[in-house]
Image (cartoon, rainbow, N blue to C red):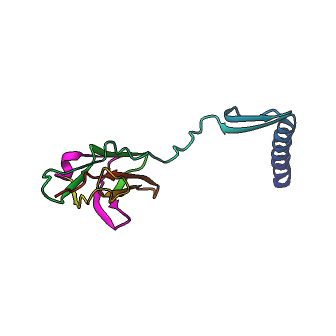
Amino acid sequence: MRRILFSLLIVMLLGTAVFSLIHVARGQETAPKTTLNQQTEGENLREIEQPAGVLAPEAPNIGFIDSPSATCYQPDQGRDACYLNWYYLSVSAAPNYMITMTLSLNSSGPLAHTQGFFQNSMYIPYNMMGDGFKVACGPLGAGGNPQLGNAYAYTIRARDSAGLGSANYGTVYCPAYTP
């Protein structure tokens, strides 16, 4: 009796497998699928499909760092002291959390370091950096522009909880110190 039941079970399993293979061989699918992407080249067709009812994982993403209006200003023309600041610094990530944002000038080490705490975005307004970062204004032409003073290259880097990074680079010129 056991052998008969075992034989019937084997026949049923083999029949199901053969039925599935016949459907696949004919181009018929056993379960509905969603086409995520489709490419054609000549008569060739390539599709990326997802079985019905299965949610695609959300791809991690980190945004570009927005850092408008990098400014160098000289509050007292009688002193060789300028301040660098930005209107704001902003970056976001999804679905991860923002961990850090750092600012460096002229390839030095980090001048400013901001930590995130379970947040998907970081926004640092200009007044959070006080007056800005104090630098030397420099004499006329010191940064390569004959009408301005020193030039400062900045790098802003951000990192999220998945290890993805984003960076923004730029140069800001200061007014010249002319005693």
> What segment is highlighted magenta in the picture?
103-131
61 sits left or right of 140 in the view: right
| Residue 124 in sight from this viewpoint | yes
Give the residue displayed 81% in from the left and 54% down from the top: 2
Q: Position of residue 116 (x, y in %)?
A: 30, 54
15 sits left or right of 178 in the view: right
* Foreground of the two, 46 or 56: 46
Q: Is residue 30 depicted above or below 89 in this figure?
A: above
* Foreground of the two, 157 or 136: 136
Q: Position of residue 165 (x, y in %)?
A: 45, 55
Quadrant housing residue 114: bottom left
Task: Give the total number of marks visible in the rendering.
Answer: 0
Quadrant housing residue 125: top left
Q: Position of residue 34 (x, y in %)?
A: 66, 32
* Foreground of the two, 19 or 146: 146
**Quadrant of the image containing the C terminus:** bottom left
* Residue 161: in magenta span: no
| Residue 30 in sight from this viewpoint | no
